[in-house]
Image: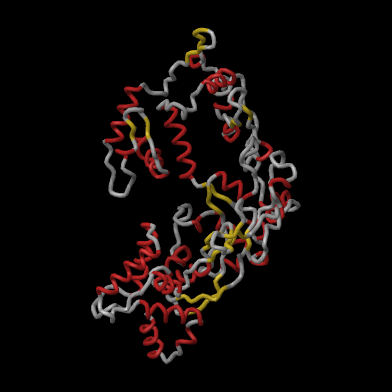
């Protein structure tokens, strides 16, 4: 690629050093050297061999010493003019020259803090005093815990450095969609609101929705531009939602939308928090479900409108006085677990535009779908120890609902009979379902091997992954 660019620059009478910034020039030079064919007509290069070595080690968790032995054997089998890495270390060095390295950041075992930037040289945690390092039996001092961080800026730069990927970085701006059709996050009102709020930022289509320009080379336009990036939202499961937003999601006030207006209650016998029929307040005011006294909770109707969603400015007004995440430990949280349920001030509020975002956190539907599927399927299959239809649930059902056919029946002293619910299956039916699951045939790579997921003896499904649950919920159950 670098030779083609040089030829183009020469034919146009241009100086290549004026087109490329210093970092981009170094990248293309290293890429050109590493991408040369091993021999004339070969489809493989030194870079290809190095990447394959690294992939093999990671895929099969091969020890580095074993990799070195295999690489040495390969080196003995080929002629010396074949320029391939002589060790696993050389392969890593070659790939790291392309600018896609990682940073190792020391951290506290319980994730209270990172030993990072101005705190990198501390010998102990500044919040609790726990040691930063430990001594190994060999007498070497090593960090107690460390994490691998993949810097985003260098990866964005590489996307603009490749002719195959850089058009996709501008696709959302150059390929306008029909209004009302969502093909890209930029079609959402959240993105459009951000563009209206920060028009200077939105004027550059290569900006990646913090702010601080980084000189980046765009190979498709043969020009440098000042790349900016902003964090539009996070995508996570519900517990991580609580960690990132700092709204505690493990109590009756867990709903981050309803907040203190939550109508959750504690089950009398199950002693768990329940949001049963809390969804009724989100229905239209004239919806028939709101007036049903017997279909949901007995003798209860819903007359309240849905709780108002707070704006970013209003939420910031609530959390601006809280301690920051770097200043807090669980033992020092004021009012932890009670109203207003905020645990600390999230670090995301340091972003100058965070309070202007319409949507700051998203829930990962696939994680939630797996939890929902496991509970649903284990209940209808009446899996012992995993079904939600247990004795405490039946007692709570009698307490809050009108389902006399499901009430527990006393047989003798301290003995009760639990009538089978109409939604649960008999053992014969469960085994028939498992047999049908074992007979399922899916396209290659579409889902796991369901033959291994069905337990015919127990009449249940085992080892279901998130994607397997997704396939069941979105494809198989609708067909059934």
Q: Extreme bottom residue here?
A: 13
Left or right: 151 with respect to 346?
left
On the picture, is 276 further left or further right than 127?
Answer: left
Q: Is residue 162 above or below residue 113?
A: below
In this rendering, does residue 123 appear at all? yes
The residue lying furthest to the top in this view is 412
Q: Position of residue 441 (x, y in %)?
A: 27, 41
Q: How is the image coloured?
A: secondary structure
In the rendered image, the quadrant that contains the C terminus is top left
User: Residue at horizontal 31%, vertical 49%?
Assistant: 445
User: Which quadrant does the N terminus fall into?
Assistant: bottom left
Q: Quadrant of residue 114?
A: bottom right
**Residue in front for this viewpoint, 190 or 438:** 438
**Residue found at x 54% / y 17%:** 402
Determine the image quadrant of residue 259. top right
Q: Vertically, is 441 above or below 121? A: above
- 374, above or below 290, in the image: below
Q: Nearer the viewer, residue 411 or 388?
A: 411
**Is 81 or 17 nearer to us in this picture?**
81
When the figure is inspected, residue 395 is found, relative to residue 1, above or below; the finding is above
Instruction: Give the residue displayed 41% in from the left and 68% down from the top.
Output: 165
Tell me if residue 355 can be seen: no
Number of callouts in the render? 0
In front of the other: 444 or 277: 444
Determine whether, in the image, residue 208 is placed left or right of residue 95: right
Q: Residue at x 58, y 57 (%)?
A: 144
Q: Position of residue 84 (x, y in %)?
A: 33, 75
Q: Position of residue 301 (x, y in %)?
A: 61, 24
Q: Position of residue 231 (x, y in %)?
A: 57, 60
């Amino acid at each position: 690629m670098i030779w083609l660019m040089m030829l183009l620059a020469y034919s146009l009478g241009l100086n290549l050093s004026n087109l490329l910034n210093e970092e981009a020039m170094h990248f293309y030079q290293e890429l050109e050297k590493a991408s040369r064919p091993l021999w004339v007509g070969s489809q493989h290069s030194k870079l290809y061999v190095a990447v394959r070595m690294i992939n093999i080690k990671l895929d099969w968790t091969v020890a580095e010493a074993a990799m070195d032995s295999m690489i040495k054997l390969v080196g003995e089998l080929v002629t010396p003019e074949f320029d391939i890495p002589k060790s696993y270390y050389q392969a890593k060095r070659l790939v790291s020259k392309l600018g896609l390295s990682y940073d190792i950041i020391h951290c506290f075992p319980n994730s209270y803090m990172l030993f990072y930037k101005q705190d990198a040289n501390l010998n102990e945690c500044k919040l609790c005093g726990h040691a930063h390092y430990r001594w190994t039996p060999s007498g070497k001092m090593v960090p107690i815990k460390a994490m691998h961080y993949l810097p985003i800026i260098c990866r964005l730069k590489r996307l603009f450095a490749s002719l195959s990927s850089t058009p996709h970085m501008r696709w959302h701006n150059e390929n306008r969609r029909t209004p009302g059709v969502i093909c890209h996050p930029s079609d959402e009102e959240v993105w459009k609101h951000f563009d209206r709020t920060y028009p200077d930022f939105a004027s550059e289509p290569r900006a990646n929705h913090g702010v601080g320009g980084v000189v980046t080379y765009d190979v498709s336009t043969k020009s440098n531009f000042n790349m900016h990036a902003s964090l539009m939202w996070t995508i996570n499961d519900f517990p991580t939602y609580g960690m990132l937003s700092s709204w505690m999601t493990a109590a009756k006030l867990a709903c981050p939308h309803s907040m203190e207006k939550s109508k959750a209650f504690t089950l009398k016998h199950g002693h768990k928090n329940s949001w049963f029929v809390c969804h009724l307040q989100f229905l239209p005011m004239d919806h028939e479900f709101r007036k049903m006294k017997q279909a949901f909770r007995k003798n209860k109707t819903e007359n309240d409108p849905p709780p108002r969603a707070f704006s970013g400015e209003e939420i910031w007004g609530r959390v601006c006085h809280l301690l920051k995440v770097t200043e807090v430990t669980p033992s020092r949280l004021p009012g932890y677990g009670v109203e207003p349920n905020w645990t600390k001030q999230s670090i995301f509020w340091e972003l100058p535009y965070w309070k202007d975002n319409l949507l700051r956190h998203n829930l990962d539907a696939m994680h939630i779908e797996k939890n929902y599927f496991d509970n649903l399927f284990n209940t209808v299959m009446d899996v012992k120890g995993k079904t939600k239809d247990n004795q405490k649930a039946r007692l709570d059902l009698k307490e809050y609902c009108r389902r006399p056919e499901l009430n527990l029946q006393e047989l003798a002293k301290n003995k009760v009979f639990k009538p089978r619910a109409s939604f649960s299956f008999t053992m014969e039916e469960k085994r028939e379902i498992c047999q049908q699951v074992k007979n399922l045939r899916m396209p290659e790579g579409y889902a796991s091997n369901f033959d291994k997921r069905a337990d015919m003896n127990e009449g249940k499904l085992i080892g279901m992954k998130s994607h397997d649950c997704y396939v069941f919920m979105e494809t198989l159950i609708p067909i059934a």
